[in-house]
Amino acid sequence: MQRRFDERYRPLGPTYQCSNVLAVDAGTSSRPTRSTRPSGGSGTVLGHVSNLSRAKGLYDVMDAFDSVRAVDPAARLRIAGGVSDQQEKADLTSFCRRHGSAVEWIGPIPNADVASFMSGIDLLLFPSSYANEAQPLVVLEAMRVGTPVVAYDIGELANTIGPGGTVCDESASFSDLVTNLVQMGKQQADQLQQMGNRAAQHFDESLRAAADDLMYLADDLLSKQG
């Protein structure tokens, strides 16, 4: 995003980036053990947190879960967020009814509960195609607790996620990518765990880099005073 900014606006001086990672509570980046997560089976637990809409990936999440259930019948999906569009709300309600107890839609949650939500899932799905998507806080919240992320390659998501998940080209099948990850996770029990460990490590590295970036920006601004 910084490169594209420079190419479009051609600033006369240096540009600086200030990562949203600084807005996320550093806390502990250790991932809770699987036994602390919601009980109800050994299937993969997928999650999605957003202002639920087509642009933010709701329908891609529902399609992906339909596909995942074919390879992991015990898989579950937890969804957090509100829906403002009545047709989208009806479609989500129908989807939940069709999958029964395998899908839990808990509605909007306060910021203080996001980390707990992320600790209770194995993989965060964030297939947003929102035109102004940049560096969503929920993605950083997931990585902070060691939950890997799958998202579309838009905004700053590729750099944000790094080795702590994977990004999907908007022209490719998000459902296929998620299903393949779940299938690999079933075949190699620690596959998602290892990816989650990398997510937590990448978050910590990004936090340190962001602190340095902020220091450089402050030094530059202070040097120009007077």
Image: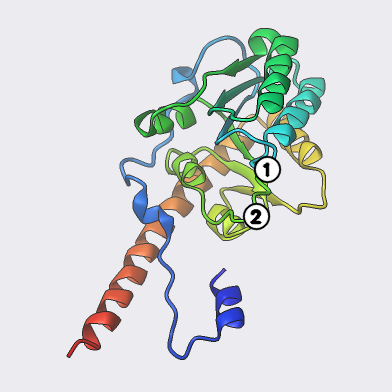
Residue 156, percent from left and from top: 57, 60
The x and y percentages for residue 170 are: 76, 52
Q: Residue at x 65, y 55 (%)?
A: 131
Mark 2: amino acid: Ala
Give the number of the disc on residue 18: none
Report x, y in % for residue 86: 66, 24
Q: What residue does disc 1 label?
A: 55
Q: Give 150 or 104, whichever is nearer the viewer.
A: 104
Q: Name the residue furthest left.
A: 226
As displayed, is residue 205 above or below residue 123?
below
Q: Residue at x 38, y 63 (%)?
A: 210
Judge whether 56 appears above or below 63 on screen: below
Seen from the viewer's position, the closer of residues 183 and 46 is 46
Q: Quadrant of the N terminus?
A: bottom right
Q: Residues within 10 Å of mark 1 (few under 14, many from 20)?
A: some
Give the residue drawn at x 47%, y 18%.
35
Q: Are marks 2 and 1 in contact (CB under 8 Å)?
A: yes
SS under mark 1: loop
According to the picture, the residue beneath numbered tag 2 turns out to be: 131
